[in-house]
Amino acid sequence: MGGRCSSSPDTLRIYSRDYWPLALLKEVKGEELPLPIAVAWPESLEEVVKLVKLCNEYRVPFVPYAGGSGVIGATICERCLVIDVKRMNKVIHLSEEDSYVLVESGIMLRKLEEFLNGRGFTLRHFPQSYPEAAIGGLIATKSVGQYSTKYGGIEDLLIDLEAVAPDGGVIPLRRNIVPRASTGPEIKSLLLGSEGQLGIITKAALKVFKIPPFDYKNSFAFKSFEDALMAVKEIVQSGLTPAVARVYDEDDSSVRFGDGRDLLILILEEYSKPLLEAKVSEIGRIISRYGGREAGEDYVEKWLEKRFDVISELKKLVVPMGLWFETIETAATWSNLIKIHSKFKEIKKVRGVYAVLAHASHFYEVGACLYFTLTYEADEKVYWDIWREAMRVVLENGGTISHHHGIGLLRREWIFSEIGPSLDYLRRIKSALDPRKLSNPGKFLG
Amino acid sequence: MGGRCSSSPDTLRIYSRDYWPLALLKEVKGEELPLPIAVAWPESLEEVVKLVKLCNEYRVPFVPYAGGSGVIGATICERCLVIDVKRMNKVIHLSEEDSYVLVESGIMLRKLEEFLNGRGFTLRHFPQSYPEAAIGGLIATKSVGQYSTKYGGIEDLLIDLEAVAPDGGVIPLRRNIVPRASTGPEIKSLLLGSEGQLGIITKAALKVFKIPPFDYKNSFAFKSFEDALMAVKEIVQSGLTPAVARVYDEDDSSVRFGDGRDLLILILEEYSKPLLEAKVSEIGRIISRYGGREAGEDYVEKWLEKRFDVISELKKLVVPMGLWFETIETAATWSNLIKIHSKFKEIKKVRGVYAVLAHASHFYEVGACLYFTLTYEADEKVYWDIWREAMRVVLENGGTISHHHGIGLLRREWIFSEIGPSLDYLRRIKSALDPRKLSNPGKFLG
């Protein structure tokens, strides 16, 4: 490994947190965060295998790391060896003919997207963490991007992966890259959302798309949040799937666009102009039927401009006021969205909470994701009061505790309420694959 | 369980095979097939739990069963208790508002589809086994249907499931039915393709669609199989996704349609007429560019008429001649399809082989499924000669050993060549969940 290992205090401090707002708050307040014991930067599969085998030999827990852009504290791992795959960042193979790319897991999403764009392709995966996330972390978190309504979540882009199991063995790529196979249960599906607890993802084969040459952008104002949602429901269920649809409630619209109406931001992307035109006209009809009125392209441009930078924008606004921020996402079927939205908004009444903004931003045939942005007194007790109330509201009203941020240290307390005894079976699987409990211990798999 | 259990010789014989052509051949030749020890027909989750716990107590292996329409011998399980969930066949809940249905796993696909059709909905899942398959089996096999290009495989329809683990514990539904969640690895993804080796699926929540009111059917003749495939590639990659696309090579076209050209069968389905028209016109342009010529709707109607009955049609033709039949499916990325097609066709030269027909029938952005139908001398040695050669051809030329039929007893020998050491990790998972090796033993998980 040469000098590609460090345990300097500065390095350990950098790796002591991800973007979990509570960890950031503690850092700002000067509180100590638990530190790893060292950081290693392997450059190949073989080096990852060697590190993991050493960890097994000496019973050293380890945690995989790449972009560090998670928001749930999943990479916080006291006295662990951080195995940062950031230097494993090669594009191994782009097949333009077959529309897929094989990469090392440490490649930054932005770098990969730029590489693809230079060749006329795109991954079309744009989470808010786009500037800082790496591919391995996106898979381990089960990420979705802002264009997911059309292009799917990371699970829909992922064709195959390679990983180093917790015991140092290799879970290899399938012999051939194929579009689909029925060859037994997919062990690789377990790596999706594994958050470092089932080994280290080292390679990924992902679908890519030709950059769509035609698009349409517009925004619409509705009389209510519900009307806007029902319009999008009909749009999606009619196969008119937009690339981006975002429905902001009045509070969220006010803060982001200075327009206190329920706004729908819409982007369509197609490969043929007549198809785009047909969709735009059908969508226009549906939106009118639900009382939507055109509000212009400016809001879309404004969103496009700031879409990866919401947190720092927020921080600029709230931190000087002694406030702090959090984002909480859930998903539910259509019939539960309005109920969750209105009950969740009542969290405004929790002592210390300043604002609760909401939008819906990833749509499916059966429902959507609701995404809440909260500001509150910069205080840990207020923080956990909010979370307890939020998780109660989503669980009791048809939601999931997480649509795409994951569990990490943050949501450990609530996962059993959602998946029940499935958790026990997952823990048995964890024990079978990681008998020494070394791969990111202390999280929800134990 | 009352009288809902039997070990009569007639019953055992019925449950001694699925639709694996080799098992059918043995039966026809009067050879003995391995028999189960008994068959039980539970009517509830509780009864399945009780049966599986009894099996654990008395160390009796068991195998889940429903439609019995598999083609790989996955349900053949000597001296096992067959747990047939066919009487667990209720539609528990259809949410018209949220477009999903919750069913017991023993419901027949055809019954479910008819139930949904009566309410304006459809599952749009039409495997060839449609008349006889049950939902649980389709999940355990990782099925795809003829409309998969637009609506996806069973994995894309599946929202959630309930199962009885091999130890008799329950893997429950998620607390709420949600469109997506990032709450750790999905243990349920392991049940997809599990072929009875990881427990018994008892319930499933599945997406449903409103019946699309507009469709377009046509067929086209091409100068070559490759031209037809490349046309479909461009159609799919341009987001013009048809519901059905089937490309038949000359031999397959001759037998099925009496037309010796490379034929493309196309069905589009949409919810709006202008959208359908826009797609049809774009698709027409692409097809012309690849030299395709309209061949009329009759071929589509002919296919629609016989699409669930190909095997019995074949049997009528081949059995009287002392021949037998087999179907072998693979999938590959676009650049490998032609190579696999031409090398696979050389299996005609294997001694005893009479015909090798081929079509491509499930399309993805990155590639497609190739489906081969073979006739050959009704002899077991010829049968295995074909399979050895077929698996060599697909593995060496970029394919998978199975696109949607699965492994069963048939493909055990080749799974390691495709997934390598992933198989060892899957076996560890199997041991963790089924320490007594009771859930469909003797298959690829051991």
Image (cartoon, coloured by chain):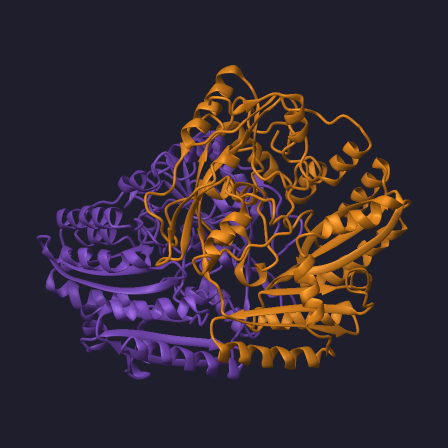
Chain colours: A purple, B orange
Task: Please name whichever residue, B272 or A326, is drawn nearer the observer in this view of the structure.
Answer: B272
Instruction: From this view, report whether residue B259 is shown above or below residue A56.
Output: below
In the rendered image, residue A79, in percent from the top left (x then y), is placed at 34, 37
Task: Please name whichever residue, A27 or A92, is drawn nearer the observer in this view of the structure.
Answer: A92
Instruction: From this view, report whether residue A112 is shown above or below residue B58.
Output: below
In the image: residue A191, left or right of residue B78: left
In the image: residue B423, left or right of residue B322: left
Task: Please name whichever residue, B90 or A20, is drawn nearer the observer in this view of the structure.
Answer: B90
Residue at x 83%, y 67% (from the top left corner): B260
Q: Is residue A431 visible?
A: yes
In the image: residue A401, left or right of residue B19: left
Residue furthest to the top in view is B58
In the rendered image, residue B51, in percent from the top left (x then y), is placed at 48, 23
In the image: residue A208, left or right of residue A351: right
Task: Please name whichever residue, A2 or B269, is drawn nearer the observer in this view of the structure.
Answer: B269
Q: Is residue B333 visible?
A: no
Residue at x 61%, y 52% (from the top left corner): B127
Question: Split into 4 quadrants, where in the image is the C terminus of chain A?
Answer: top left
In the rendered image, residue B235, in percent from the top left (x then y), is placed at 61, 72
In the rendered image, residue A20, in percent from the top left (x then y), is placed at 28, 52
